[in-house]
Image: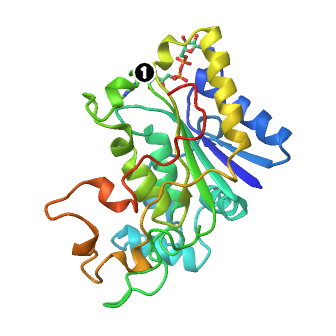
């Protein structure tokens, strides 16, 4: 497989960077080709603004989706964005790796998504009509490819459990898993999570690193999170609401969008959980 790791950490000697290197070493040993986008090392421009659309008439009002679609269609995206899109096209598997900052990804990585996920590339793909709402949620540019997160968090696993004060980790990650990865077509693998990361000592690191190596060895066989497909018949179109017969009356929340309510794959040993 071709694997793209997008890594967001400002410190090259960080735990995150050490885990990135463990992942790369194991993937390479398994015969995969690995590309790395180390966003801080690249000096990645995190904010989407007018400079992203050099072909836009300087007097024109900036409307981002149409400017983005136009730049995509005319191949006038900036070089840094076009290069990341090429990496995504090459990759069979995308890994986003980051420390949990304020319950989500660091701004530099969100800026990578904002800028690289252009209109006509990651959204605005396929027929949009009263009968079909585009190629999204399981279909689209990245259909048939896999993606997953590697996330370190300061909090304890219990803090992120079903009754934990931070909210369940699968809910906190839902906008990334479902919105950023499944939306443009990826099959999303369960995340590799490291809790209490700030307290990790050398022995703890070795245990986590071994868990990560094991995870890197089963990426092709691991069962993805069973998100429903938009165009698979489960949703009414154009309302895009789940069919009444697929959930109990009054049922709500992110878990509705899973074909089963169970956790994705408990069979994979993960010493960090
Ligand atoms: P580092 O600081 O680089 O290292 C962590 C520990 O790992 C250190 O003790 C280090 O010695 C040790 N370590 C062991 N082996 C190695 C090795 N081989 N290489 C490097 N280090 C090693 N946490 C939450 O749970 N929820 C939040 O919402 C949240 N928000 C945050 C917001 C901000 C702005 C910040 C700064 C932190 C936040 N945190 C939060 C905590 C954050 O998630 C952790 O600080 C982070 O995940 C730790 O990963 P790191 O790579 O930065 O660790």
For the point 35% across and 90% down, which residue is it?
129
> Residue 119 or 197: which is nearer the viewer?
197
For disc 1, the neighbor class at 10 Å (few under 14, some 14 to 19, many from 20) is some
Q: Specify whether tag 1 is near ligand 1 (CB below 8 Å).
A: yes
Q: Is residue 230 above or below residue 106?
A: below
Q: Judge whether residue 48 can be spotted in this image.
A: no
Q: Position of residue 131 (x, y in %)?
A: 35, 91
Q: Judge whether residue 159 can be spotted in this image.
A: yes
Q: Is residue 55 above or below residue 162?
A: below
Q: Position of residue 89 (x, y in %)?
A: 68, 65
Q: Is residue 237 left or right of residue 258?
A: left
Residue 114: image quadrant is bottom left
> Residue 179 or 215: which is nearer the viewer?
215
For the point 37% across and 81% down, which residue is it?
133
Q: Is residue 163 left or right of residue 67?
A: left
In the displayed image of the protein, which residue is found farthest to the left? 250
Residue 96: image quadrant is top right
For the point 22% across and 74% down, which residue is it?
244
At mark 1, the secondary structure is loop
Per the image, the residue denoted by label 1 is: 154
Q: How was the colour assigned to the protein in this rendering? A: rainbow
Quadrant that contains the N terminus: bottom right
Q: Is residue 59 above or below residue 195?
A: below
> Residue 109 or 96: which is nearer the viewer?
96
Q: Position of residue 194 (x, y in %)?
A: 52, 27
Q: Is residue 85 left or right of residue 262?
A: right
Q: Position of residue 176 (x, y in %)?
A: 43, 50
């Amino acid at each position: 497989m071709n694997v793209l790791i997008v890594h967001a950490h400002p410190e090259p000697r960080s735990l995150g960077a050490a885990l990135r290197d463990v992942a790369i070493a194991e993937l390479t040993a398994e015969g995969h080709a690995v590309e790395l986008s180390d966003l801080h090392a690249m000096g990645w421009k995190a904010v989407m603004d007018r400079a992203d659309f050099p072909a836009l008439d300087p007097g024109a009002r900036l409307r981002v989706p149409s400017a983005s679609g136009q730049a995509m269609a005319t191949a006038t995206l900036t070089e840094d964005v076009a290069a990341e899109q090429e990496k995504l096209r090459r990759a069979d598997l995308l890994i986003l790796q980051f420390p949990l900052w304020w319950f989500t990804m660091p701004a530099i990585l969100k800026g990578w998504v904002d800028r690289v996920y252009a209109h006509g590339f990651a959204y605005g793909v396929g027929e949009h009509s009263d009968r079909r709402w585009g190629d999204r949620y399981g279909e689209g540019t990245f259909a048939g490819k896999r993606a997953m997160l590697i996330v370190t968090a300061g909090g304890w696993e219990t803090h992120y459990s079903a009754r934990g004060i931070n909210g369940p980790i699968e809910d906190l990650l839902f906008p990334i898993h479902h919105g950023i990865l499944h939306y443009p077509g990826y099959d999303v693998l369960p995340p590799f999570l490291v809790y209490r990361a700030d307290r990790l000592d050398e022995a703890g690191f070795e245990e986590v690193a071994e868990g990560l190596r094991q995870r890197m060895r089963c990426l092709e066989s691991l069962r993805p999170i069973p998100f429903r497909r938009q165009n698979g018949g489960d949703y009414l179109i154009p309302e895009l609401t789940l069919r009444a017969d697929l959930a109990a009356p009054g049922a709500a929340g992110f878990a509705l969008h899973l074909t089963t309510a169970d956790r994705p794959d408990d069979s994979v040993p993960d010493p960090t959980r």
